[in-house]
Structure formats: C-alpha cells, structure tokens
Amino acid sequence: MDYSHDKFWKHFETIFNAKLPIKEAWNKIIDYPESIKPKDYWATLRQLNVEQEQEELKAWMEQIVTKEPIYKSTIALWIGITKLWDDESEKEFYAIYLQGSKNYDPKDTEWIDFPNYEPEDNYGLIRNLNLMDEVLKTDKEDYAFLDWILPVAYCALTIDEIIRTKLDKSIFLTSRKRLFVTTGFDEGDFVNLTDLS
C-alpha cells in the first residue's frame, strides 16, 4: 500500500490542531506512516530528542530578535525550512531561517517574497531534521514523500508549542500586540502557527 498525500496531511492537521506536547504529537505523526509501511527506522525517529531541541530553537529565536528587534511595521514572521549546501562536507543539510514582512495572507505565502525584516544572523540548524534526513535517505522508494511531510510537520508542531508555552513573547511584541507566524518550505507547503499575542 502507498502513502496518500491527502490522508497524511489530514492526519497531521488533526494532531496539529490538538495542540499536544511535542513528544506525544511527534509519536502520533509517526503512527500513520508506520501503520501503512512498517519499517525499522520508525523506532529511530521516535527516539529523536524533540524536547531538548525545543529549548535550542527557543533560544535561537529569542537571540535573533533581541539582537535585532522586529520593526514596528512588521506584522508577520516566516520561519522558512530549506536545505543548504556545505562545500566542506559536500552535503546538503536542513536549516531554518527567520524573517518578517509588513504583509500577510493566511492562504498564500507570496508575502514572504517581500521581507522587510531580515536579521543578519537569521539561520539556524535543526539537528533532528538532519538526523531524520539521514535515516530516511536509506529508503529510496519513499524518501521523496517522507522528506516532504515529516520536516514540515516536525517544524510546525515544535515551533507552535514553543510559541504557545515557552517563548518570551515580550521580546517579540515590543511595538505591537500581535504577530502572525507561519512556517514551511520556501516553495511548498506551509502551516500558519499560533499567533504571537
């Protein structure tokens, strides 16, 4: 049996909307693909240290906006998921970056093409995405599909919980009462997260 794009996305949306703690949410995300195609690597992906990485991501986000405060005209933040090339190791690796815009549309990400807030040191590594990538690359048949859904689900779930429960919002809301936040691939699927308010 093959994976269904629509069913997997609906599975993810159900878990995302439940606002579960990251470890529980991540295990539930894995339940769907594992039920369709049992593989040895699902156990490895369940062991990712998602809680520790949340603390690192929280610190990364807070450090960026403390060093370069968000402009008053910025109404939305984009946390982009991308792959970068490392010349030294001659490998691609996952990274995320933070930027802001004075425009926002919850149904379309064209607004991210015109950022007005681009901090200097705004890229960060997500260790778990790179560990996940190494594991999934062993599955030639399903890598392309899983390399799409799992990174965006992981980032949405973990960053949303950081916003809801861990982030020092006062650093982000110095000159506004609300900031929209979206995460996703530069040219692909995206998820609107809980607003910063």
Image: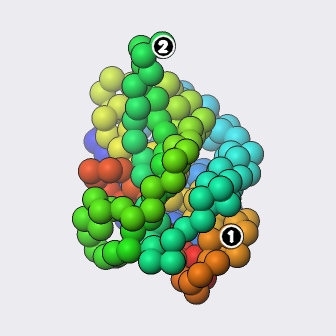
Q: Pick the quarter of the image with the N terminus.
A: top left
Q: Residue furthest bottom?
A: 177
| Residue 66, placed above or below residue 128 | below
| Residue 155, placed above or below residue 43 | below
Task: Name the residue beneath numbered marker 1.
Answer: 171
The residue at the point 62 percent across, 77 percent down is 173
Q: Would residue 184 be seen by someone viewing this image from the given angle?
A: yes
Q: Pick the quarter of the image with the C terminus.
A: bottom right
Q: Would residue 5 be seen by someone viewing this image from the given angle?
A: no
Q: Position of residue 49 (x, y in %)?
A: 70, 41
SS assignment at label 2: loop
Q: Name the front one of labels 2 and 1.
A: 1
Q: Please indicate whether residue 4 sits to the left or right of residue 151 in the image.
A: left
SS assignment at label 1: helix
Name the amino acid, label 2: Ser
Name the amino acid, label 1: Ile
Q: Please indicate whether residue 85 sits to the left or right of residue 166 in the image.
A: left
Q: Position of residue 126 (x, y in %)?
A: 57, 40
Q: Position of residue 92 (x, y in %)?
A: 41, 25
Q: How is the image coloured?
A: rainbow
Label 1 Cα neighbours within 10 Å, binned few <14 / some 14-19 / many ≥20: some
The residue at the point 38 percent across, 74 percent down is 102
Task: Name the residue beneath numbered marker 2.
Answer: 89
